[in-house]
């Protein structure tokens, strides 16, 4: 087990696996692999901060972290380079916010859905969370469709919620309850 994995497991970010992926605690060592995505203006359009300008900015961001958030690096099961991440911040007892990023070259393969589903499964069935929510820009159609495929329900729109690098933006709030997740039809 790598140092980052041991430290992440101690902070409550265990390594998780799915049929095609391994999710382990994200560390500074993932900056090289994830910088191209974080520097991509089109990919970062809907984020609350602008694209990263340098690899050092990505390293510093990953090194700083945020104790309120746990972050899993997404890796193909047989590879060691991160292709994205899933972040979870517990907002109050048994209620967590989720966020995610996947390198554009891996879009369209169901990998983001698989990674997020793996983390959600852990949150509900291992940690006993009762609710997971996400906020996304109303114009971020791909993210909204992904959330809906996972069973999240649109719960509302907060007008002029974020001041971002592209201006004042609304946000759409999506929620998923444990019973929504555990009672959903399973894909075969």
Image: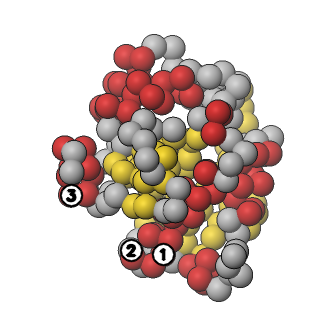
Q: Position of residue 46 (x, y in %)?
A: 68, 35
Q: Nearer the viewer, residue 122 or 105?
A: 105
**In this rendering, is residue 117 above or below 32?**
below
Residue 11's label in the rendered image is: none
Label 2 sits on residue? 127
Earlier-in-chain disc, 1 versus 3: 3
Please give the name of the residue rendered at 61% of the width and 51% of the height, measured from the top-left corner: 111
Secondary structure found at label 3? helix
Q: Are marks 2 and 1 in contact (CB under 8 Å)?
A: yes
Secondary structure found at label 2? loop
Label 3 sits on residue? 10
Q: Position of residue 40 (x, y in %)?
A: 62, 22
Label 1 sits on residue? 124
Counting other residues with Cα less than 10 Å from the Cα at mark 1, is it few (<14), some (14-19), or many (20 or more)?
some
Whole-Å distance between the Cαs marked 2 and 3?
15 Å
Please give the name of the residue rendered at 39% of the width and 76% of the height, measured from the top-left corner: 126
**In this rendering, is residue 66 above or below 148?**
above
Earlier-in-chain disc, 2 versus 3: 3
């Amino acid at each position: 087990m790598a140092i980052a994995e041991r430290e992440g497991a101690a902070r409550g970010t265990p390594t998780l696996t799915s049929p095609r992926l391994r999710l382990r605690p994200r560390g500074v060592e993932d900056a090289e692999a994830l910088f191209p995505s974080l520097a991509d203006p089109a990919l970062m359009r809907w984020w609350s901060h602008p694209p990263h300008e340098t690899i050092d900015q990505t390293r510093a961001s990953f090194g700083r972290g945020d104790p309120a958030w746990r972050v899993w690096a997404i890796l193909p099961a047989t590879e060691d380079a991160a292709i994205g991440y899933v972040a979870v911040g517990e907002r109050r007892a048994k209620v967590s916010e989720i966020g995610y990023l996947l390198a554009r070259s891996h879009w369209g393969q169901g990998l983001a859905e698989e990674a997020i589903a793996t983390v959600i499964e852990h949150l509900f069935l291992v940690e006993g969370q009762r609710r997971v929510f996400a906020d996304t820009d109303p114009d971020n159609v791909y993210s909204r469709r992904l959330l809906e495929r996972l069973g999240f329900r649109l719960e509302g729109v907060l007008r002029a919620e974020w001041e971002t690098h592209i201006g004042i933006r609304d946000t759409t709030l999506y929620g998923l309850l444990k019973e929504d997740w555990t009672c959903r039809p399973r894909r075969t």
